[in-house]
Image (cartoon, rainbow, N blue to C red):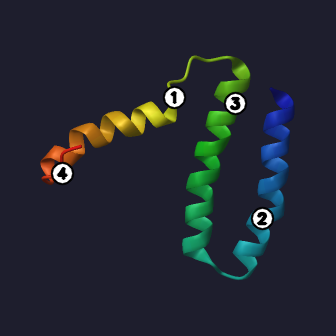
């Protein structure tokens, strides 16, 4: 698990300074949000936590959302 954390931190240390130096603030914000989510997901997977399949989460969301906008599958 420590290797996953170190790899994620290493990649962030490579990417973040270039975004910061070029003053690409929206890209830095988007990268940070996605990178934190990816890091948490990777750490939970390596820790052996029971995580639902992301496809099933999307499927349940869309089965609720589509009828609201008038689409039935």
The one nearer the camera, 24 or 57, is: 57
**Quarter residue 27 falls in:** bottom right
3D distance between C-alphas at marks 1 and 3: 15 Å
The one nearer the camera, 44 or 64, is: 64
Nearer the camera: disc 2 or disc 4: 4
| The C terminus lies in quadrant | top left
Q: Which residue bears the numbered disc 3? A: 43
Q: Which residue extends farthest front?
A: 73
Q: Is residue 12 above or below residue 39?
A: below
Q: Secondary structure at mark 3?
A: helix
Q: Tell me which numbered mark, 2 or 3, is placed earlier along the sequence.
A: 2
Q: Secondary structure at mark 2?
A: helix
What label sits on residue 15 in the rendered view?
2
Q: Which residue bears the numbered disc 1? A: 53
Q: Are marks 1 and 4 in contact (CB under 8 Å)?
A: no
Residue 60 left/right relative to 50: left
3D distance between C-alphas at marks 2 and 4: 40 Å
Q: Are marks 4 and 3 in contact (CB under 8 Å)?
A: no
* Residue found at x 64% / y 26%: 44
The spot of residue 67 in percent (x, y) is 15, 45
Sort mark 2 into few (<14), some (14-19) or many (20+) by Cα contacts within 10 Å: few
Nearer the camera: disc 1 or disc 3: 1
């Amino acid at each position: 698990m420590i290797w996953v954390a170190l790899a994620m931190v290493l990649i962030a240390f490579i990417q973040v300074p270039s975004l910061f130096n070029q003053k690409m603030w929206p890209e830095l914000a988007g990268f940070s949000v996605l990178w934190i989510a990816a890091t948490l997901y990777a750490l939970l997977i390596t820790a052996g936590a029971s995580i639902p399949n992301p496809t099933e989460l999307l499927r349940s969301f869309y089965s609720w959302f589509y009828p609201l906008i008038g689409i039935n599958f």
